[in-house]
Image (cartoon, rainbow, N blue to C red):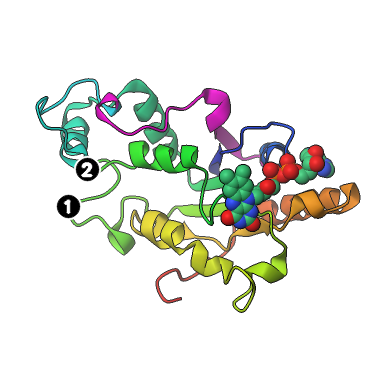
Amino acid sequence: MKILIVLAHPEPKSMNGALFTTAIETLQAAGHEVKTSNLYAMRFNPVSDSSNFTRLQNATFFKQQLEEMHATETGSFAYDVDQEQEKVEWCDLMIWQFPLWWFSVPGILKGWVDRVFAMGRFYGAGKYYEQGIFSGKKALLSLTTGGEEGAYLKDGFNGDIINMLKPIHRGIFGFTGWSVLHPHIVYGPARLSPEAREAELNKWKKRLLQAVDEQPIEVGTY
Ligand SMILES: Cc1cc2nc3c(=O)[nH]c(=O)nc-3n(C[C@H](O)[C@H](O)[C@H](O)COP(=O)(O)OP(=O)(O)OC[C@H]3O[C@@H](n4cnc5c(N)ncnc54)[C@H](O)[C@@H]3O)c2cc1C
């Protein structure tokens, strides 16, 4: 299987860094092809504007989605955007590895989506949801939190984490056609002992080996 892993964490020695490295090693050892986008290490520019394109259809009024359709027709996405689009198009399974920041993804990852998931190339003209361009491909969120698991239950301090992830699961993945796998969550790694963190990495290895054959979850009805 062709697998893309996107990492959004500024510290390679973090738990997210360890989960990222574990995923690459585990999947490659199992015979999968792996590509990565380590966004901070790449110094990926998350600011979405006219620099997404090598030339503009309308240089006097910037309208991103119109420029995206034009760039799809004329092959005029900026090199850094095009490289990421090619990786997303290449993979059968896409994994995002990130710490939960403000109940969401870090800004660098949101900016990656804003620039890379372009109208025309990734969605539009009736290509949404079940008819989406990435229909048949799978997407998996792997995240860590600061809070403990109990805080993320339905009646917990912060509320249900699955609901929290809906804008990503439904609004980004579902909208563009991906089948969504159940998220993999390490709760409060900073509160765990080194042994418990090691156990989490082993749990992740096992999950990864099953993930390629897992059935997707329903993201439209919760
Ligand atoms: C802007 C911002 C917003 C935030 N918003 C939220 C929020 O909305 N909700 C929430 O719950 N939290 C939030 N947090 C907290 C954040 O989610 C957690 O700090 C983060 O998920 C922890 O993951 P980490 O990879 O940074 O862990 P780290 O703190 O880097 O890792 C924990 C420990 O694991 C150790 N480690 C690394 N590799 C290994 C290894 N191979 N084996 C064993 N141990 C290892 C590290 O040395 C470290 O001591 C926020 C934080 C920020 C900065």
Residue 99 in the image, given as x and y percentages of width and height: 61, 47
35 falls in the magenta region: yes
Write down the region rendered in magenta: 26-51
Q: Is residue 128 left or right of residue 66?
A: right
Q: Earlier in the sequence, mark 1 or mark 2?
A: 2
Image quarter of the N terminus: top right
Q: Which residue is mark 2?
A: 120
**Residue closest to the eye, 203 or 209:** 203
User: What type is the residue that disc 1 sits on?
Assistant: Ala
Q: Looking at this rendering, what residue extends furthest in the front direction? A: 157
Above or below, 90 against 103 in this view is above
The residue under the point 72% across, 52% down is: 204
Q: Few, some or many C-alpha atoms within 10 Å of disc 2 (few <14, some 14-19, many ≥20)?
A: some
Rendered image: mark on residue 125 = 1
Quarter of the image where one finds residue 20? top right
Q: Is residue 210 left or right of residue 126?
A: right
Residue 57 in the image, given as x and y percentages of width and height: 11, 28
Per the image, label 2 sits on a secondary structure element best described as loop
Marks 1 and 2: CB-CB under 8 Å?
yes
Q: Is residue 153 left or right of residue 178?
A: right
Q: Is residue 143 visible?
A: no
